[in-house]
Image (cartoon, rainbow, N blue to C red):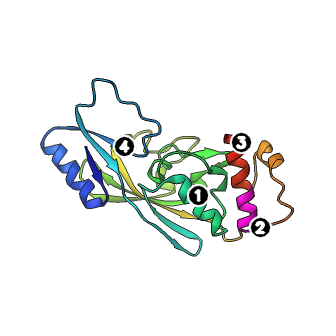
Amino acid sequence: FATCSTVEMLRDALEWAKHTNHRVHILGGGSNVVFPDRGFEGLVLRMDLRGVQFNAQTARVAAGENWDHFVAQCVRRGLAGVECLSGIPGQVGATPIQNVGAYGQEVRETITSVRAIDRNSLQEVEFTRAECDFSYRHSRFKGPDANRFIITEVRYALREDGHPHLRYAELEQAVELHQTTGPDALNAVRTAVLALRG
């Protein structure tokens, strides 16, 4: 078991596993992982890459950051685009894999690029939104390239207008925005989503 808090640590651990012929399992938040009672014969790498950088309406987020904490930060800043994805467990790095979505929003709408380690070459690579090949609950990281890349960073382009775009009838009924925008409107959406998930 190894906790990786830098890309270099992640690469070193992968290189060790390759040379010692150990299987590798990447552990994110662990909210959807069950190990058998007999254990796992290999190396478990816990993704602990941290850091969130905002520059105007863009966000550069390390894969080990908690997804819902990131959503809460966007809401507080009045940045729209991920508020309907409140309350989803797991880490930021997992969101591009299955194109996480809820209540009419998907991460592909805001993702601009994804950085990753290629497990074959141990080199860093970067994919544009188009290269991620997003579709409903799917991406290249879940399909043809499943288990080949370990996501290390995701970049998002959010909207500074702070105006939520609601496309889900149940959510629209639960939220009364009264023409407000910014953090108040986004927080109303976040509160309603968390209540609906309750």
* Tag 1 residue: 71
The extreme right residue here reads 178
Q: Quadrant of residue 8?
A: bottom left
* Tag 3 residue: 196
Q: Which mark is residue 119?
A: none
Q: State the extent of the magenta-drawn residues as a range.
A: 181-188
The alpha-carbon separation of the residues under discs 3 and 1 comes to: 16 Å
Q: Which comes before the other along the chain, label 1 or label 4?
A: 4
SS of the residue under disc 3 = helix
The alpha-carbon separation of the residues under discs 2 and 4 comes to: 37 Å
Q: Which comes before the other along the chain, label 3 or label 1?
A: 1
The alpha-carbon separation of the residues under discs 2 and 3 comes to: 21 Å
Sort mark 1 into few (<14), some (14-19) or many (20+) by Cα contacts within 10 Å: many
Sort mark 2 into few (<14), some (14-19) or many (20+) by Cα contacts within 10 Å: some
* Tag 2 residue: 181
Task: From the viewer's perspective, tell me whether residue 126 is left or right of residue 162.
Answer: left
Q: Which comes before the other along the chain, label 2 or label 4?
A: 4
- Name the residue nearer the viewer: 80 or 198: 198
The alpha-carbon separation of the residues under discs 1 and 4 comes to: 21 Å
User: At label 1, which amino acid type do we have?
Assistant: Val
User: At label 3, which amino acid type do we have?
Assistant: Leu
Q: Which mark is residue 27?
A: 4
Sort mark 3 into few (<14), some (14-19) or many (20+) by Cα contacts within 10 Å: few
- Name the residue nearer the viewer: 107 or 86: 86
Where is residue 10 drawn, in percent x and y? 27, 54
Where is residue 147 drawn, in percent x and y? 35, 41
